[in-house]
Image (tube, rainbow, N blue to C red):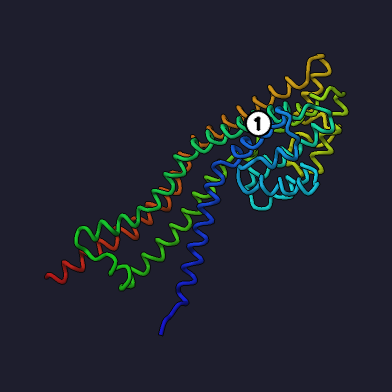
Amino acid sequence: MKWRVPSRPGRLWRDKWRRVQQRAKTQKSDIALVASVVQRLAVLLAAGVAPGPAWGYLREGELPTLIAERIARGEPVPDAIVAQLGQVTEAEATAWRGLATAWAVALDAGAPLAATLRDFATSLRSLAQAQREIRVALAEPASTARMVMALPAVGILFGLALGFNTLATLTTTPIGWVCVGVGTVLLLVAARWNHHLVQSAQPKDLTPGLDYDLMAIAVSGGGSLDRAQSSMARAVERYRYPTSSVVSVIDLASGVAAVLDLSRRAGVPAADLLRSEAEEARRRARAEVQEKAASLAVKLMLPLGLCVLPAFMVVGVLPLMVAVITSTNIGL
């Protein structure tokens, strides 16, 4: 008689692990992928290729292919982009929505589409570089948090290496059961605590400065600033681009509106001011995350000292002492 029921949970766990790995791999290259697509589109459009066929030439993955199929059926490019964002990461979806917004704004403002996409690709590459620097800054403290969680298991293996069956002590004696329970609770608390600390150090704005770049596109068409603001507000609302700066056309307290107001008062081109402000926003985001990563390394000592080390003592050291005392009594 063959039993196959246990294979299903194993298969489910394997499938879940593959999805986690795939998601992690995607998150490492999300905005860089969009930047590559936008750059190729800019080159094709500058060479005289129409927007629809230009998308058809792309071979950058499944998403651009699906977008090209929608465009071939007559759907507007921005609508085709946002219709295919159900299975991508949050950062990548924000970048794609930014592309849809930039495309719509450029068409509405009369800005040259090829030059617009080239500038937008430069912005996305800068964002991708900022994301890489952020991941590097957070990698060391996050790895430290994962490594220290293995200390209790190291204690058990150390006891086995010394010739004492600490596993038997943990699994067959009442004091071992208490040790396992207390150690498990401490490790769960430490894991939750570490996760909360690492997540709190993650950047809240996944695309810093992109609001300014989009408004720079809106004003590069040569129209008035008021018309550019109106065009930007309509595109943001339609394509649900998540922005904190471009809230409304009359929100002069926002960052973008403040730069536009400065451009009016000083009589200087708004596009250059907006792109400069975008780079400054990215520099501030990188500095903020690096500062959080430095403090994270110190904060992670709290769950280590209050949870992981006590769990190590309870699961790794105490059973070893019990095994030593038991073997000594048996020897006597």
Along the line of sight, the residue nearer the viewer: 39 or 324:
39
Q: Residue at x 31, y 73 (%)?
A: 172
Q: How many marks?
A: 1
Along the line of sight, the residue nearer the viewer: 155 or 62:
62
Q: Residue at x 71, y 31 (%)?
A: 117
Position of residue 143 in the picture relative to residue 135 (left or right):
left
Residue 212 seen in render:
no
Residue 19 seen in render:
yes
Looking at the picture, how far across and down is residue 51, in whole percent?
Answer: 75, 37
Read off the residue under disc 1.
121
Looking at the picture, how far across and down is residue 79, in whole percent?
Answer: 78, 45
Give the quarter of the figure containing the N terminus: bottom left
| Secondary structure type for disc 1 | helix
Q: Residue at x 74, y 41 (%)?
A: 241
Along the line of sight, the residue nearer the viewer: 67 or 223:
67
Q: Amino acid at mark 1?
A: Ala
**Position of 295 relative to 271 (above/below):** below
**Position of 243 relative to 186 (above/below):** above
**Position of 80 relative to 163 (above/below):** above
Looking at the picture, how far across and down is residue 235, in whole percent?
Answer: 81, 38
For label 1, the crowd category at 10 Å Cα-Cα, with few meaning under 14, some 14 to 19 and many 20 or more, is many
Looking at the picture, how far across and down is residue 298, in whole percent?
Answer: 46, 39
Q: Residue at x 68, y 28 (%)?
A: 118
